[in-house]
Image (cartoon, rainbow, N blue to C red):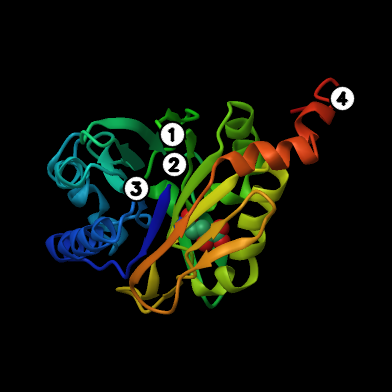
Amino acid sequence: MKVAVIQLNVGENKSKNLSKAVHFIDEAAGKGADIILLPECVNFFGDTAEIINQAETIPGPTSDVFSKKAKEHKIYINCGSIYEVADSKYAYNTSLLFDTNGEIIAKYRKIHLYDATFKDRFTSKESENIRPGNKLVTADTEFGKFGLSICYDVRFPELFRSLALEGCQMIFLPAAFPQYTGSMYWETLLRARAVENQCYIVAAGQYGKSYNGNVFFGNSLIIDPWGTVIAKAHEGEGITMQDIDLSFVEQVRNNIPTFSHRKPEVYKL
Ligand SMILES: NC(=O)CCC(=O)C(=O)O
C-alpha cells in the first residue's frame, strides 16, 4: 500500500488552492499512490470572519472535486479538512475520506478546537467560528481499518487510544501546525501517539507563510508503529510517499502486547 502525504501552502483563493491540490493528487496518483492525505483547511485559509462564507455543505463543490479525483484515479483520498456549514454563524472543521468509487466513507468533525494564546505571538480562537464534533470516526477499507483526527487532536491521547481500541491500524492527522509549537511538539506528539497505540500515523501539514504572516511548520510525516519516522516532507509544497505494510502493526502488537496488559478497571478513562 503506497501512502502519499501532500504538503501545501493554503491561501484565501479557494479555486487556486483546489487546483494546486488537484495537481498534486494527479502527480501522486501517477506515481502509484493508493491513499492520499492533504492538510487541514485544504481549500481556504484566511481571515476567521470569512470562515462562515467559505463553509460548504457536504456533499458540495469542494467534496465533489475530491470525489471525482478519487474515482478517476481509483484511489482513497483523505481531503485533509474543509469548513462545513453548521448553522448561520458556525461551521465544522470536517475531514472526509473518499473510497475508490469516489464515495464518502468517513466524515469526521474536529472534536478539540484550537483555542490558544501566546502573548506577543499569536492567538487562535477556533471556537469563535467552529462547532466541535462529538463522534469517533473510523473507516474499513480493503487495506485495513483507519481512524480520522485533525491537528490539535494530537494533544489528546484519549482520542487515539479510543481509535486504536476500535481496531484502527493507521490514523490520519491533517494539520495546520504553526512553526512556533510545531518546532517544539509536532514530531514528539505524533511519535508518541504511534508508539503508545502501536499504529501508523500519517500526518500532512500546511507549510510556510499564511495570509497574516504566521508561518506553518510543514514537516509532514509518516510514522510506523515503533515510532520510527519512515518518511518526512522536504521544505515547501510537495508530495512525500511511502510503502506501508499494515501487517507490521500486528507484529509490533504481538511483540509487546500492551493492549492485553491494560488495566482499564484501574483507570478513570
Ligand atoms: N490547527 C490546529 O489545530 C493547530 C494546533 C497546534 O498548533 C498545536 O500546537 O496544538
Quadrant of the image occupied by residue 84 = top left
Question: Residue type at mark 3?
Answer: Asp
Question: Residue type at mark 4?
Answer: Val
Question: Residue drawn 52% across and 43% down?
Answer: 171
Identify the residue position indicated by label 1 in the image. Answer: 133
Q: Is mark 2 within 8 Å of ligand 1?
A: yes
As drawn, 21 above or below 201 = below
Q: Which quarter of the rendering shows the C terminus?
A: top right
Whole-angstrom CA distance, mark 1 to mark 4, is: 28 Å
Mark before the other along the chain sequence, 3 or 1:
3
**Residue 208 at x, y = what percent?**
38, 77
Identify the residue position indicated by label 2 in the image. Answer: 110
Q: Can residue 78 be seen by looking at this rendering?
A: yes
In terms of secondary structure, where does tag 2 sit? loop
Identify the residue position indicated by label 3 in the image. Answer: 34
In terms of secondary structure, where does tag 3 sit? loop
Decide: few, some or many residues near mark 1? Use Cα within 10 Å; few <14, some 14-19, many ≥20: some
**Is the Cβ of the residue at disc 3 closer than 8 Å to that at disc 4?**
no
